[in-house]
Amino acid sequence: MVLELGRDLFFDYTLRTVALGSATLGVVSGALGAYAVLRKQSLLGDAISHATLPGVAMAFLLTQSKAPLILVIGAAIAGWIATLLVISIVNNTRIKEDSALGLVLSVFFSGGLVLLTVIQKMPTAKQSGLDTFLFGQAAALLERDVITMASIGGVTIIIMLLLWKEFKLLCFDTSFGASLGFPMAILDVLLITLLVIAIVLGLQTVGVVLMSAMVVAPAAAARQWTNRLGGMVALSVLFGAIAGVSGAVISSSAVQVPTGPTIVLSISAIVLLSITLAPNRGLVWNWIRSQRERRKLRIEVVLNDLYTLASQHEDPRHSHSTAVLEAMSAHRSNVRHSLRELASRGWVENVNSDEWALTSEGVIQARYVAGRGR
Amino acid sequence: MANHSDALAIEVEDLTVAYRDQPVLWDVDLNVPVGVLMAIVGPNGAGKTTLIKVILGLVRSAAGRVSIYGQSYSAQRRLVGYVPQRGSVDWDFPTSVLDVVMMGRYGALGWIRRPGSRERKLALEALEKVGMQDLAHRQISQLSGGQQQRVFLARALVQDAQIYFMDEPFQGVDATTERAIVELLQELRAAGKTLVVVHHDLQTVVDYFDWVTLLNVRRIASGPVKDVFTEKNLRLTYGGRIAFLSRSGDEPAETQIAPHVIEPEEVENGGTGIGERPIL
Amino acid sequence: MSSEVLEIQLIAIVVAVACALPGVFLVLRRMAMMSDAISHAILLGIALAFFVTADLTSPLLIIAAAATGVLTVSLVELLNRTRLIREDAAIGITFPALFSVGVILIARYAGDVHLDTDTVLLGELALAPFNRFEFFGYDFGPRSLWVMAAILCINVVFIAFCYKELKLVTFDANLAATLGFSPALIHYGLMALVSVTAVGAFDAVGSILVVALMIVPPITAYLLTNRLSRMIVLSGLIGVASAVGGYWFAHYQDASIAGSMGLMTGVFFALAFLFAPNRGIVAIARRRASQRWEFAQTMLTIHLFSHEGLPEAEREAHVNHLSSHLHWEPDFAQQVVRNAERRGFVRNRAGRLDLTHQGREMAQLALVK
């Protein structure tokens, strides 16, 4: 099965092309998406991808060409204008960012729809081909397209790597960066431009609606596993690529399952896995940690109760019944469990059937716990 | 030996700044001699942070000029170190203490070049000076407020500057850190550096600083603490006795300070800090 | 106008108003992007309900879709509450995932029926009149008109009854909670409303246009007024104007009706963005220009005032000094001085400027402010 898959990936032209294209998309959007997520621009990706539609249509109207490069350039210009518009609306009015994003997204998309219907009705051209930008059509990717994607994406990633420390400064501490003399406004525009390019590259594969997930999800998943920017970008790239390839493979092996949504579901699964399983941050990890703390607390409570009871007698090792301890505890059912745990540590001992007493080690521990609580 | 009268570290002339339509600084003149440890104090909204940001070229001025050692800021950038407000960055950013400190070398590195072992060494030394060497590889979100501030100071230290601008370095730090920062500042001044510190706590001005600028949109006064930090000037800065009381009603942040400001003995005795100040 | 043309416009108007009402609160509560998330995610609800009923007109679709909308909101909140993913990222992950499930279900199991993703996203208003609402053989007009009218009524009733609570929760959620209103209840009520409206509108105008109609008119109104009640009314009016204007634009350009209406909301926004009194770009620019002169006047008097009687006054108070020290263009400096002279703030003696009594007062006044 695996061998078969490997063979298909190598020799099946369509599958190979689609897988490579989707992987490229995952790599580029994963890398740039990391910055978008860190800069709290997650939804900007959504707005940019919707806003590219009129750019694609306009490029076609002006050139009458459906060459991917031309359409991609049109899309990038529209996405870029949309971003600048969002920034200018937020800066010049009291409109908040979320509103500005939604506004630009929906109005640009509407404009794109209008242009598409106009194109559709032109006698010279069929709309087909432009449609793929809406919902993506990975299956229609050609080797040529993948090469274009990979080379543009490669340039994008090289720029990102070259300006690594400058972009880190931009994301972490803009005013400090400016005080060092780096032109932060230019870096800001540059980074956004790279994000626009990353998004536009993915449109043909997953379409405008789903592209936002490819920007946000790999980075959000990657953040759970690492505390370093380098690690985050690398993992984000890896997750993006895995989602791309697995999406392509899964959709090719099932009937009538579109590639774009499959890729998005793959990356969503990775996000889910990451937030549950990632060490230190993940939900499971947190749950185990809180359980451990809770158990420790319960044991300490029983130890302390036993010590308090005993200190009312001459002998700090005076024994008491489980029932008394249970009466003192908020969690009756756990008292026995805690006592057994304490006994196994040698801090308490079972005097007779249901009576428990502190050992000398237990007294020391109880004093320590009591002292710390003060 | 730092001599106050010799040279000017910072010279600000006729500086006016307006955000949108609202003036933030009006015609501020300011001369800061080399080798002083200066506090900028003033009520909220007095333009303290703005003054620093204008000098650093982060905010555009409507009029006036700034020079650092007699030249424009862009020409003297390498002589300047900056500690922004701690709250101005996202401490959940995925990066380590060491990495943040190394950012102080980015300016000297210039475009594209990455920090290497030299930068690492400098950063570790700076961390040692602020007592954070053990936390070098800690993720920054796991730091306390005081530790975050120390990281920022270490970052400024590796800039190896002549003039330091610090925006409220004592904001929200514990007493130990405050003590450590003060010692560090005084050590830097002893080494001939000039330090400009936006400061909130009027009670400690006399103890910590030897130079002070009182600012409230205008420069009210600037000079040695013992000459300038007077009741009269404080009243001018914080708005006179009656206006002062009503102001403290408007701005709750000032209410705790308010009674201390007017206590004449505290001001007139000049505190003990000045007498103890080592004259180098 | 044929009855069909009239009916399309009528539907468009009802949709526009129905969308604008909850939209106002989305915009004010900074949840505008939630409309985008909900309007996409409901595809899953529609698909699931369709598999159960095999009927695109079933009311179950609306209920299922509304449930999906609320589910989306809760998922986003759930993710956000883990504190592992910030809210904006949580939105950006959740709705594409739900939408993808919907798309896959439809592509795999319903590829041959009339339910395709294009319609959900883009809508086709021109087809709406062909789907009639018939009862005992009588024709009561287009089905979607009735559906949307019902949804509009629900929206109106909800907002009218909960107006005070909505207002309070929107502007001060904490106060609302202490007064005993449940912000969560109002919040989810609003989200359900948004979902129901989105699902009702999707086959008429498509989900992206739902976003446009929901948030763009309220955003435009937000630039024009400060009062909530006026904002609601204005949003409705702008929505109606966009709907009608969009329809006729599409009519003459032979373009997508939904797209044209969305575009028209953008046109109205652009007009407000540029020309709104007080908050428009033009008004701001004009105010800045006049303030620049006023500011320069004040700056001059303050500059003279600051140096008055000091040793450096001779130098500082000279006309030639202004351009170099205040960084003014010489021409601009000359003009400011002439203006100040005319208004009696300064006296100019061979380039040396002195404040008049009036000028001194002006400087002092400006400094006190």
Image (cartoon, rainbow, N blue to C red):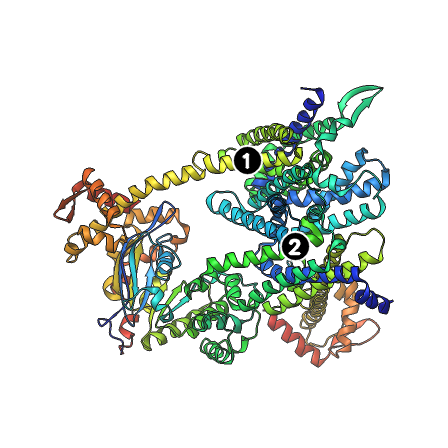
Quadrant where the N terminus of chain B is found in the figure: bottom left
Identify the secondary structure beneath mark 2.
helix
| Disc 1 target residue | C267
The residue drawn where x is 82% and y is 21% is C135
Note whether residue A176 is visible.
yes
Identified by mark 2, the residue type is Arg
Which badge, 2 or 1, comes first in the chain's sequence?
A: 2
Mark linked to residue C81: 2
Q: Is residue C225 visible?
A: no
SS under mark 1: helix
Instruction: Work out which residue is located at the far right of the displayed protein and give it.
Output: A1
- Chain letter for mark 2, please: C
Give percent across and percent down for residue C261.
Answer: 62, 33
Q: Is residue A119 above or below residue A6?
A: above
User: How many C-alpha atoms fall within 10 Å of the one at disc 1: few (<14), some, or many (≥20)?
Assistant: some
Marks counted in the figure total: 2
* Residue at the image position 69 percent from the left and 58 percent from the top: A145
